[in-house]
Image: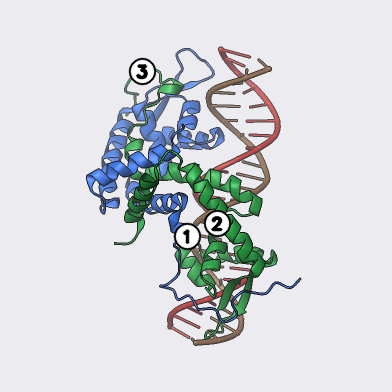
Chain colours: A green, B blue, C brown, D red
DNA sequence: TATTGTTATACTCTATAACTATA
DNA sequence: TATAGTTATAGAGTATAACAATA
């Protein structure tokens, strides 16, 4: 069977007039576009701390949860264990975090922010919050709150 | 200078009680988590059509914009030209789209869905819409509309 | 000179298998 | 037997450089 195109004399889509209404009706498409847009700004700002998004989320979570294990970090951040090893190693080499023997489980290691790490993470978090307001500058504070609530309704477990 | 951890006798964070409140206050973090959650379901459902998310968005956009060029697709979907080549090639080999000489620019190629392609894409779109309602099942119709509006406010250019 | 489509290639991110030491 | 952490490696996704044909 030959596969003929439907519209031989098709209306040429000009660069400005591409119809993307269908994709824009999907939550997933819009969430992805938003994430990419926000994360792009985030990456630029976090570069001053030598943090990529994943480094920041790991470091921040350690700072807020002293003694957390690698396994817990993996579970909560959705990172696979082999991919976390290098991240932890780098943060440790930079002197931002420290490993300490786990209290009850000698297989595990408790992760802690150093004094210097905690200070840097605190500054990065302040930058992230300022940046957040800029990235979502087209939203009112109430809209921003609504947006986050709705997003969490979608991805948080039933 | 030695870098000492802040809390030697730190409260051990248990798996269930990891504090992620800071990350959850950021739009980017929540948008990313949502996108990943929705796209995971999307991938599973689209596998029956042999579509990954990017294949679906390319095919659907071609179907809705007969005669669109590769360059236009790249611009609107955020795909780099070298990475689009293989996608187009596969869709063409599957008989879902067809290349036709561009009306006015002999460098360019107009992309068109074939009759078979249009039918498959139509079915995939119907599946996507059904899936959409399931993925965002914790949202009312009004909330879903609000969510999409707010997301677009964030990522659409000023 | 600039743009479309293309090839080749590098880099990053993510995923899988398997090992060790402890539980 | 199962789990925490690790190594090595494979695969997918994304990025840059450079080219021929055409504008």
Reading the image, the residue beneath label 1 is: B22
Q: Which residue is located at x 34 percent, y 46 percent?
A: B46
Q: Residue A127: image x %, image y %?
A: 57, 51
Q: Secondary structure at mark 1?
A: loop
Q: Are marks 2 and 1 on the same chain?
A: no
Contact (CB < 8 A) between labels 2 and 1? Answer: yes
How far apart are labels 3 and 1 at the CA level?
51 Å
**In the figure, B137 relative to B85: above or below?**
below
Q: Secondary structure at mark 3?
A: loop
In the image: residue B31, left or right of residue A63: left
Mark 3 or 1: in front is 1
Which residue extends farthest left? B141
Q: Which residue is located at x 36 percent, y 51 percent?
A: A151
| Mark 1 neighbour density, 10 Å: few (under 14) some (14–19) many (20 or more) | some
Q: Chain of mark 3?
A: A
Reading the image, the residue beneath label 2 is: A125
Q: Which mark is residue A10?
A: 3
Q: Are marks 3 and 1 on the same chain?
A: no
Q: Which quadrant is home to the N terminus of chain B?
A: bottom right
């Amino acid at each position: 069977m030959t596969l003929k195109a439907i519209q031989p004399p098709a209306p040429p889509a000009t660069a400005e007039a591409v119809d993307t209404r269908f994709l824009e009706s999907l939550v997933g498409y819009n969430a992805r576009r938003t994430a990419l847009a926000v994360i792009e700004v985030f990456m630029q700002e976090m570069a001053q701390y030598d943090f990529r998004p994943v480094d920041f989320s790991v470091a921040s979570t350690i700072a807020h949860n002293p003694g957390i294990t690698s396994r817990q970090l993996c579970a909560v951040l959705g990172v696979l264990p082999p991919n976390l090893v290098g991240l932890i190693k780098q943060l440790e080499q930079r002197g931002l975090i420290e490993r300490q023997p786990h209290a009850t489980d000698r297989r595990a290691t408790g992760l802690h922010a150093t004094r210097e790490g905690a200070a840097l993470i605190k500054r990065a978090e302040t930058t992230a919050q300022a940046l957040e307001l800029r990235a979502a500058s087209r939203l009112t504070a109430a809209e921003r709150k609504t947006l986050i609530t709705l997003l969490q309704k979608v991805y948080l477990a039933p």
